[in-house]
């Protein structure tokens, strides 16, 4: 480029203000407002939300969903196909029939010829059972002094308790009696077993019985069992040798050795006491009001 051209270009740049200085990029435009801080004003709210979890959150008021009125499997396979499967499950999980025979006490007095038994048998399901109970006592070589048989229908009324109704028939040296019976059997916490019943005879005589026991497992095979029984009557019945109120009580302590769970010989001590008019009737008959005896016996079930 010649000297004349350079001088001409310089004059043009000096005469033009837009070429003399670089253009201001913000000229003619309003400055935008600074962007709002997205966390401004929310710091306190965020910390509060972080602290409110689980049960601290507000409770909703939306209605609960309706339970299905039809089993879901029926919608796929049909009710006719699923009904036999449901009946099978009920039978296998609580609806199946079973049975048990329990000889709880079968013992003799080591100091005399006396013997005693008590046991029960049941057949049925978890919901419906036929229960047979029997107990009695006597002396070897002599007729049975007292025996009773109960035929009952049992049905659960609580998770661990059964209601039982039926009849009881007494067979004894004195007058026989037939009773209407209502009672219960229950398993209380810590495996404490208890049962009780009310009896109303055909003569209108009302009586009650309560008994309970507990198994202390000393080892896997050695078990000690305390046991108690109380009998009470609403009125004097001289023909049966019992008086009103608490008639008698029995406390026993038996130690058994389980050769198998189903077969266990035992030894023990039994204390009985008659009270009130029942004790008076016993003395009049030549018996004592109180006695303690050593026993040996067998507990078995199948």
Image: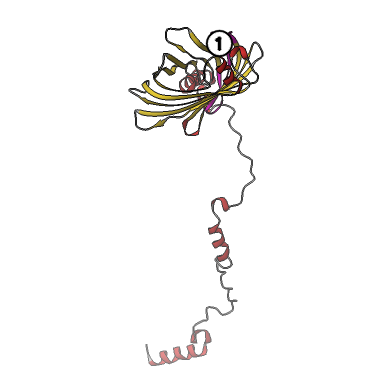
Q: Residue 235 appears at what percent x and percent y? A: 65, 19
At x 63%, y 21%, the residue is: 244
Q: Image check: 205 left or right of 89?
A: right
Q: Residue 102 appears at what percent x and percent y? A: 44, 18
Residue 98 visible somewhere in the drawing: no
SS for callout 1: strand
Picture mark count: 1
Does residue 213 sit above or below 176 in this rendering? below
Q: Nearer the viewer, residue 267 or 62?
A: 267
Q: Residue 36 appears at what percent x and percent y? A: 57, 69
Q: Image check: 247 left or right of 204?
A: left
At x 63%, y 43%, the residue is: 62
> What predominant SS class does the magenta segment belong to?
strand
Q: Nearer the viewer, residue 48 or 71?
A: 48
In magenta segment, residue 104: no
Does residue 221 sit above or below 44 in this rendering? above
In magenta segment, residue 171: yes
Q: Nearer the viewer, residue 20 or 179?
A: 179
At x 48%, y 88%, the residue is: 13
Mark 1: few/some/many CA within 10 Å (<14, 14-19, 20+)? some
Q: Residue 209 appears at what percent x and percent y? A: 57, 22
Q: Which image quarter holds the C terminus?
A: top left
According to the picture, the residue beneath numbered tag 1 turns out to be 170
List the single residue furthest toward the left.
Answer: 259
Residue 61 visible somewhere in the drawing: yes
Q: Nearer the viewer, residue 60 or 116?
A: 116
State which region is magenta.
154-177
């Amino acid at each position: 480029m010649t000297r004349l051209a350079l001088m001409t270009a310089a004059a043009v740049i000096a005469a033009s203000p837009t070429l003399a200085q670089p253009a201001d990029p913000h000229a003619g435009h309003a400055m935008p407002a600074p962007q709002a801080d997205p966390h401004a004003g929310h710091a306190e709210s965020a910390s509060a939300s972080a602290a409110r979890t689980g049960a601290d959150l507000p409770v909703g008021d939306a209605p609960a969903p309706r339970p299905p009125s039809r089993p879901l499997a029926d919608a796929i396979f049909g009710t006719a196909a699923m009904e036999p499967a449901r009946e099978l499950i009920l039978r296998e999980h609580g609806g199946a029939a079973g049975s048990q025979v329990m000889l709880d006490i079968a013992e003799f007095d080591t100091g005399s010829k006396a013997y005693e038994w008590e046991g029960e048998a049941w057949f049925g399901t978890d919901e419906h059972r036929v229960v047979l109970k029997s107990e009695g006592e006597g002396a070897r070589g002599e007729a049975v002094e007292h025996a009773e048989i109960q035929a009952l229908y049992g049905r659960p009324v609580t998770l661990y308790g059964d209601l039982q109704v039926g009849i009881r028939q007494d067979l004894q040296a004195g007058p026989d009696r037939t009773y209407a019976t209502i009672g219960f059997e229950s398993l209380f916490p810590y495996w404490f077993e208890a049962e009780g019943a009310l009896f109303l005879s055909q003569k209108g005589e009302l009586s009650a019985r309560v008994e309970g026991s507990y198994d202390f497992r000393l080892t896997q095979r050695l078990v000690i069992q305390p046991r108690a029984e109380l009998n009470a009557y609403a009125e004097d019945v001289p023909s049966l040798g019992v008086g009103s109120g608490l008639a008698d009580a029995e406390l026993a302590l038996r130690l058994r050795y389980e050769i198998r769970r189903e077969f266990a010989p035992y030894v023990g001590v039994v204390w009985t006491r008659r009270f009130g008019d029942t004790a008076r009737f016993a003395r009049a008959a030549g018996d004592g009001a109180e006695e303690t005896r050593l026993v040996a016996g067998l507990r078995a079930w199948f």
